[in-house]
Amino acid sequence: MPLLLLAVLLYLLSAGMFAVGTFTGANLRNLPSVALLLGFLSYALYFIHRYASTGHFPIGDIYGMVSLIGNLLVLLFSFMTLCFRRNVVDFGMIVAFIGFLTTLIGVPAREVGYKNPFYVYHILSAAVAYASLILGGLASLVKLIVEKKLRTKHIEGFMVPVNLLRKIERGFLNVGFLFLTFTLIFGSLWAKSFLGKHWINDPKLILTLVLWVYYAFLTHLNLVKGIRPSRLSLLSFVGFLMVVVSLTLIRHTVQ
């Protein structure tokens, strides 16, 4: 628990430093990003420690799942800052605050209910898929806003290069679809060993399959360049809304 609370405090500190840098122009160098990364490392150590001490991962309920996804968002953003430097640092305050809230939510999380490795792989791949598709959808939303500003020649305020947003959008769409595929594969293997069959008519599984078909179509159009960039961004944002609904409102009927 101390490691989890340390992660919460580090994320809050990082969000505060990002806010100071964004709104006052103070040069804090890499301190906000370092605090952000240390927050993730504290969560990762907590995650490993819980497994080492109990034999279970702390992702057995919605609180633990949301916490895992939030921390994966932080990790993906940290990789983005290494690749794109100052171009994405203005998003740091939002990402750090998301890390703070989701990690705080994860404090009462229960351990995962099954030791079967395929179930663990299923959960972890789902978390990576959701985190990637959420980031991709948010990048699409920002891209649509920036493009609208450029069309109307209203370029005051917050702006991000469109080419950068396009790279982030398409990169996370591909990564999200890949791990969504792993989610279905590992979920099928776990269901076979636990329930004796590869598929059950569970609302969560059905929606996951719908998401996979949706993103398979979207990824294919993206790869063959068979869709206009603005329409791709719009469909990506629609997919983001579907992911949020799946994560927050739809539950497994089989526990």
Image (cartoon, rainbow, N blue to C red):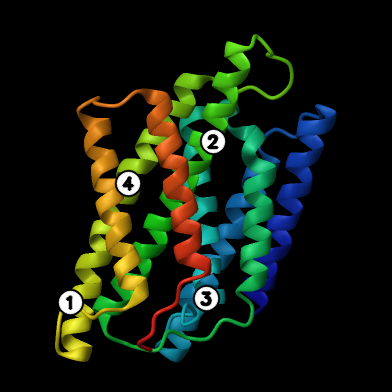
The residue mark sitting in front, 4 or 2, is 2
The quadrant in which residue 4 appears is bottom right
Residue 118 is situated, as x and y percent measured from the top left of the image, at 24, 77
The residue mark sitting in front, 3 or 4, is 3
| Residue annotated with mark 3 | 62
Bin the neighbour count of mark 2 within 10 Å (Cα to Cα): few under 14, some 14-19, many 20 and up: many
Q: Is residue 186 above or below residue 32?
A: below
Q: Quadrant of the C terminus?
A: bottom left
| Residue annotated with mark 2 | 141
Residue 10 is situated, as x and y percent measured from the top left of the image, at 70, 58
| Residue annotated with mark 4 | 175
Residue drawn at x 23%, y 81% is 200
Q: Quadrant of the N terminus?
A: bottom right
Which of the numbered marks, if any, corresponds to residue 189? 1
Among the two numbered marks 3 and 2 on one chain, the one whose residue lies closer to the N terminus: 3
Bin the neighbour count of mark 1 within 10 Å (Cα to Cα): few under 14, some 14-19, many 20 and up: many
User: Quick check: marks 4 and 1 in contact, CB under 8 Å?
Assistant: no
Q: Is residue 201 left or right of residue 91?
A: left
Among the two numbered marks 3 and 1 on one chain, the one whose residue lies closer to the N terminus: 3
Among the two numbered marks 4 and 2 on one chain, the one whose residue lies closer to the N terminus: 2
User: Quick check: marks 2 and 1 in contact, CB under 8 Å?
Assistant: no
The residue mark sitting in front, 2 or 1, is 2
Bin the neighbour count of mark 4 within 10 Å (Cα to Cα): few under 14, some 14-19, many 20 and up: some
